Amino acid sequence: MYGAGDVRVEDVPDPVLREPADAVVRVLRSCVCGSDLWPYGAMPASEQGRRMGHEFLGVVADVGSRVSGLKRGDVVVAPFVWADNTCDFCREGLQTSCRHGGQWGLNGVDGGQGEAVRVPQAQGTLVKLLVGEDSELLPSLLTLSDVLCTGHHGVVTSRVAPGRSVTVIGDGAVGLSAVLAAERLGAERIILMGRHTDRTDLGRDFGATDVVAERGEEGIERVRELTGGDGTHAVVECVGTRQSLETALGVVRDGGVVSRLGVSQYTEVPMGFDTLMRNITLTGGAAPARAYIEELLPDVLDGKIEPGRVFDRTVGLDEVSDGYRAMADRKALKVLIQP
């Protein structure tokens, strides 16, 4: 990405092993993330460009001498940050803060939207998938790299449990994944706030019991009506704007929890004396996907959940710029990339 709206496909050097803990993965599937749309809409022009993509799965092509448990030919999925999975933060389930980890596409590391990727800390980062390269499950398995785990993170941190109610704000892929995750954990009532009927229809398939299309004060009032005036025990905010956060605080029940998943487009949080008196908890953040993959993987493999349904368009590498445009114009929910 060279700037707002400027996505190019270029030839770059083939990845090779640089460190003993590296692996090289040939990409089978990647995708465009909703968070990629923020720089797509506002990134300053650059002469060098920035490697893109942080969600991918593929086949191991080579492994370094310090990598065990993986071999050439293994199908693997990579979480959206790489990590050693052994440091103190990783052991606490916070691989996003790994002392020896990092992000795709930065500091000489490849991005996932390409033909191949050098994976640092491969043994701690990659998770083996017992499927073939042509498995029909690849789209759903790809969601384990980010979007499904992110939705699950919002549900877990907002303390969704059987008998509890939750509002999910945003009908993008993360919001729909949060609906799926909430239903998986037994939420009694799941209210999805979104205005795109094709997406909210999928949300109903995923487990939403109610859909609220109104925004702002009207949306808050509607959720309150549905919950007898109280609001829901949990709120998962999947947009990232100040308005969506204010809506979250407006629909959460006293004593409830708001989890932020959307990439924040604000710097101040409206948590004044009113929220103090209501005992509202504000939590969330970047999902440590690596901590959740093994928990969610069996349900994907067994077909109990089908998170890959969030992909509604598939493009090749040469068409990636069209994929970005389609998502930015709301003509696609989430674009799958098949190199």
Image (cartoon, rainbow, N blue to C red):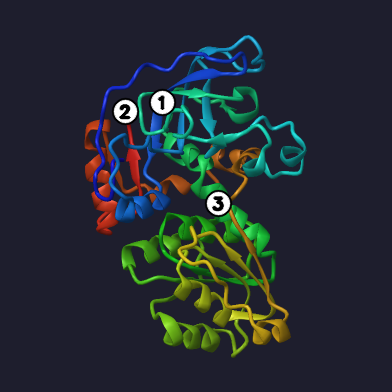
Position of residue 310 measured from the top left corner of the image (x, y, whole percent): 40, 51
- The mark tally for this picture is 3
Q: Position of residue 57 (x, y in %)?
A: 47, 30
Residue 79 shows up from this direction:
no
In the image, what residue occupies the spot 22% across and 32% down?
A: 318
Q: Is residue 303 above or below residue 58?
A: below
Give the answer, above or below, for where 314 lies relative to 175.
above
Question: Which tag, 3 or 1, sits closer to the chain's start?
Answer: 1
Q: Is residue 90 above or below residue 189?
A: above
Q: Are marks 2 and 3 in contact (CB under 8 Å)?
A: no
Q: In what quadrant of the picture does the C terminus appear?
A: top left
Task: Please give the residue where the numbered disc 3 appears in the rendered image.
Answer: 150
Which residue corresponds to mark 1?
27
Quarter that holds the N terminus = top left
Q: Residue type at mark 1: give it.
A: Val
Asked whether the residues under the numbered discs 1 and 2 touch, taking CB atoms below 8 Å apart as contact, a structural biologist would say yes
Q: Residue at x 66, y 58 (%)?
A: 156
Which three-letter amino acid code belongs to the residue tagged 3?
A: Thr
**Residue at position x 57%, y 48% in the image:** 149
Q: Which dot marks residue 339?
A: 2
Q: Residue at x 39, y 35 (%)?
A: 30
Q: CA distance from mark 2 to mark 3?
A: 24 Å
Q: Which residue is farthest top?
A: 65
